[in-house]
Image: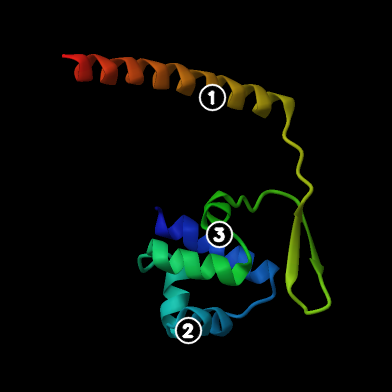
Amino acid sequence: MDNLKIGHKIKKLRELKNLTQEHMAKSIGISQGAYSRMELGETEITYTKLEKISEELGMKPEEVIAFNESMVFNVMHNQTGNGLVINNNQISEGDKNLYEQQISQLKEENTYLKSVINGLIVK
């Protein structure tokens, strides 16, 4: 994982949820300074830490990793003050076609690699 990119995503999500670094640090059992260094990409974010951070953000680790700040979000707060993030982003037709092309190429590569593996197992 790219610590700088993950740290930046965590910071944006934390800000969307109106949580402080102090709150997040306490929830995962580290100092505020150590937490700040994670957001800045200066220290490694282990998967265990990412799981704890994700849980505090009310998300799955893979959702944190996939977060894209260029998406348009509405931030709403429920009665307890926790943030709810709703994705209002629509994918463009061009992006959709590009993703479909990439998926097709990956499927072909997957099929080829399976045949190579099967050839190695049979021999």
Q: State the residue at coordinates (57%, 19%).
A: 101
Name the image colouring. Answer: rainbow
Furthest-left residue in this view: 123
Residue 118, position as x, y percentages in the image: 28, 17
Q: Which residue in the structure is indicated by mark 2?
A: 32
Instruction: Determine the secondary structure under disc 2.
Output: helix
Q: Which residue in the structure is indicated by mark 3?
A: 9
Identify which amino acid the numbered label 3 is placed on: Lys
Q: State the residue at coordinates (58%, 72%).
A: 56
Identify which amino acid the numbered label 2 is placed on: Gln
Residue 37, position as x, y percentages in the image: 42, 73
Residue 108 quadrant = top left
Residue 36, position as x, y percentages in the image: 47, 76
Looking at marks 1 and 2 on the same chain, the residue that comes earlier in the sequence is marked by 2
Tell me, yes or no, if residue 40 can be seen here: no
Residue contact at pointers 3 and 2, CB within 8 angstroms: no
Identify which amino acid the numbered label 1 is placed on: Ile
Residue 34, position as x, y percentages in the image: 41, 79
Instruction: Determine the secondary structure under disc 3.
Output: helix
Q: State the residue at coordinates (53%, 19%).
A: 104
User: Which numbered marker is on residue 79?
Assistant: none
The residues tagged by marks 1 and 3 sit, at their Cα atoms, a distance apart of: 25 Å
Q: Which residue in the structure is indicated by mark 1?
A: 103
The residues tagged by marks 1 and 2 sit, at their Cα atoms, a distance apart of: 41 Å
- In this picture, residue 121 sits left or right of residue 52: left
Residue contact at pointers 1 and 2, CB within 8 angstroms: no
Furthest-front residue in this view: 122
Tell me, yes or no, if residue 82 can be seen here: yes
Instruction: Bin the neighbour count of mark 1 within 10 Å (Cα to Cα): few under 14, some 14-19, many 20 and up.
Output: few
Quadrant of the snapshot with the C terminus: top left
